[in-house]
Amino acid sequence: MNISEIGGEFGLIERITRDPASKQIIKGIGDDAAVVRFNNNYLIFTIDSQVEGDHFCFDYFTPEQIGKKAVEVNVSDIGAMGGKPKFFLVSLIIPKTTEVEIIENIYKGFWKICSKYDIEIIGGNIAHGKQLIIDISMIGEAPKQNLKYRSDAKPGDAIMVSGYLGSSTAGLNLFLNKISGFDEVKRKYLEPEAKFHKVEPFLQYINAMIDVSDGLASEVTRICEQSKTGAIIYGDSVPIEPITREAGAACHKDALDFALYGGEDFELVYTVSEKNLDKVKGFVVGKITDEKTIKILKNGKEEILTGHGYDHFLNNVNI
Amino acid sequence: MNISEIGGEFGLIERITRDPASKQIIKGIGDDAAVVRFNNNYLIFTIDSQVEGDHFCFDYFTPEQIGKKAVEVNVSDIGAMGGKPKFFLVSLIIPKTTEVEIIENIYKGFWKICSKYDIEIIGGNIAHGKQLIIDISMIGEAPKQNLKYRSDAKPGDAIMVSGYLGSSTAGLNLFLNKISGFDEVKRKYLEPEAKFHKVEPFLQYINAMIDVSDGLASEVTRICEQSKTGAIIYGDSVPIEPITREAGAACHKDALDFALYGGEDFELVYTVSEKNLDKVKGFVVGKITDEKTIKILKNGKEEILTGHGYDHFLNNVNI
């Protein structure tokens, strides 16, 4: 059995992981990032790779955009835990024929995002390989009360998203279909941004949280698995911008599928108790249930969601 | 100009790095690992990759050995700062055709080294790629007084190593030359081990320290660059086991070259003031000088060391 046959991430994860033994580990494997306590400091650790050909290609991205994206996806993981990014390490795998200018411009992208969030590069490593890979390992921090996990959703919670979905996948599809125009949508794919600032003002009212790396359907499934709940997703309420729908139509695709099964929107998905709904912002897109299934309501019809959407190994999988 | 033409690591590093701005960063880019202060905790961060074809190949290594090596090299970097490893994250790049059993056995290797050092895996990420790559990002800790840097060598210090050198490169050469026997030497290549325990008892008497990833000549050069000193290496005093010399001879190579320009011995190189020499263990292999050159004394003749030895990008380079 090889990696592509194992049927999603969960079979493999069970085979290779163990429960944390150290009491310092507040949250180990199975969330957007790990949380470790060092005396009174709650530090958040995540690692994420960007692989040439899988996560970016030089036909669409400038080196600076690649650098920016590699940092933003890690900032998004830290934010999904309720934390602020602080420092990061860079591991570069570089083909020997790579022009030095490309690496310099990737670093320009890194440093621009560093300025944006007031964070710093503290070290790294370079090795050779067959394709360009950027692995970023980021350290964040949060006060204890701000920490948010996938595992704290409660039956009855509203499922919310912080913004419009599907535009990043729409952008990718525009490139793949060689459709001109739609620059604004394409930019969402080329220059994704972490969205923590949107939820920060009302963090205290959020129960569970995750960022959208792999589409709303996947993220809700992950919350339900960790929280041991079910969910119903209101398909017709998923917020999609008109221009994203137009881009979908131009690609002969349904933009709702981009939102549910695409990814890399980096909006936050969070659950909120009914009584706190007036204290938060965002779009209600479903409800946490005490069943074990995840359903989707589309055009007035309920369907059981099967699978997590796309082949997960197309994208990054947290382990 | 591409990466292989840039002439070593230092040209590139100057182009992409900046001095740390945050006062929390005690040591940033340019050492074996970064040191960051969080209140009273001094945390050590490093990242290191193992690339199929460059750092390991399945012809020689079992998957478990690959897993063990990937962890040990990071433990060695933490130890070279004077620290103890605590936790790590794993980023795996896996070709789609990889058998799941290989990944499970790599993790068996991880967990064995976790037990050895009482450390834990706190998270990770999987993505697809053209070759198997293991990127490990490790977090360590040290009391402030134990922290050791490359930059603290003083003219007059003795340069010491914690043990025999050259055996790992001898092991690799035995494989490349298809020479049978020498199992003990080959094992040094296949199962490298961090050596921090050797220097821990007399850490207080060490000025500068680094681990041997790329050969003694490279490591002494790095200490001198960071400490703004020169050095003389006593070529005839470099400790090499007789079996390593025999392995070298079988490969028609000089084992001293393995020690100077090979790598992956993971012994520690450290400098000690003359007055403290009776309080430490190890082999004296040179002296720190106040010149700007690095010389080597061989067969009674002094030569200026040119270059750092091997092509650095064959191996990992800390940035």
Image (tube, coloured by chain):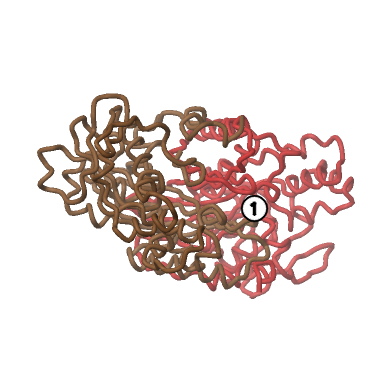
Chain colours: A red, B brown
**Where residue A4 appears, x then y in whole percent?**
69, 67
Toward the top, the furthest residue is: B291
Q: Nearer the viewer, residue A222 or B22?
A: B22
As drawn, A64 above or below B173:
above
As drawn, B305 above or below B310:
above
Give me the residue at 29% from left, 57% from top: B241
**Where residue A318 appears, x then y in whole percent?**
57, 59
In this image, A22 relative to B313: left or right? Answer: left
Kindly indicate the quadrant of the structure image that contains residue B235: top left
As drawn, B194 above or below A69:
below
**Where residue A265 appears, x then y in whole percent?**
68, 47
Q: Nearer the viewer, residue A231 or B112?
A: B112
**Where residue A114 appears, x then y in whole percent?**
52, 34
In this image, A194 relative to A61: left or right? Answer: left
Question: What chain does mark 1 sit on?
Answer: A
Q: How many marks?
A: 1
Q: Nearer the viewer, residue A227 or B121?
A: B121
Residue designated by label 1:
A213
In this image, B192 relative to B56: left or right? Answer: left
As drawn, B319 above or below A236:
above
Crowding at label 1, few (<14), some or many (≥20) Cα neighbours within 10 Å?
many
In this image, B81 relative to B253: left or right? Answer: left
Q: Secondary structure at mark 1?
A: loop
Viewer can see residue A267: no
Give me the residue at 51% from left, 48% from top: A78
